[in-house]
Amino acid sequence: MKSSPTLPNNPDDCKMAALDDEKSRTDILNRLKRAEGQLRGIQRMIEEGDACLDIATQMAAVRKALDSTYVRMTMCFMEQQLQARAQADASSVQPVDDLMHQMETLLGKIR
């Protein structure tokens, strides 16, 4: 069940809300578990004496996976907060979805 995040009355009271959407949390956790598996693979490669270039390639892949997961988490959080604020106006849902897609594209460019 999706719950609405509590919005602070005073900006000074603002605390970062948790990610409420179960599907998004599951997606992020699955991404992190894959990255964890990649890290274990890198550890095994080092223990077995694999070539540094191969290890570096895998490290770069893990970094990209973590960056991508960070962007996904940020997008989920932003969407959750925007949807909570737009909840009163049902006609604003589609523009919020469009805005989120554009923001994800922009955030993706910083990788």
Image (spheres, grey):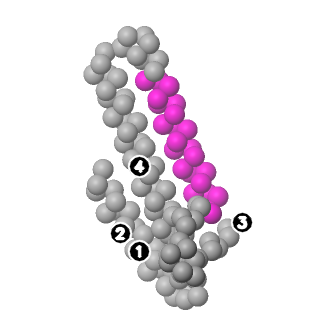
What is the spatial separation of the Cα atoms under label 4 and label 1, in whole angstroms? 20 Å
Up the image or down, 73 lies above or below 82; here it is: above
Q: Is residue 32 left or right of residue 49?
A: right
Which of the 4 quarters of the picture holds residue 101?
Answer: bottom left
Query: Where is mark 4, residue-wise?
Result: 68
Image position of 86 (left or right of 101) = right
Which label lies toward us, 4 or 1? 4
> Which range of residues does the magenta coloring cover?
20-42
> CA gap, disc 4 to disc 2?
16 Å
Q: Which residue is mark 3?
A: 1
- In the image, residue 4 lies in the stretch drawn in magenta: no
| CA distance for labels 1 and 3 | 24 Å
What residue is pinned by disc 2?
A: 102
How crowded is the residue under tag 1: few (<14 C-alpha within 10 Å), some, or many (20+)?
few
Q: Residue at 57% of width from left, 46% of height from top?
A: 29
The circle drawn on residue 20 is none
- Residue 108 position in % (x across, y down): 33, 56
Q: Residue at x 53, y 71 (%)?
A: 14
Amino acid, disc 1: Asp
**Callout 1 touching callout 2 (CB < 8 Å):** yes
Question: Callout 2: helix, strand or loop?
Answer: helix
- The amino acid pointed to by label 3 is Met
Q: Residue 98 — which label? A: 1
Mark 1 residue element: helix
* Distance of label 3 from label 2 (alpha carbons): 27 Å
Is residue 23 within the magenta segment?
A: yes
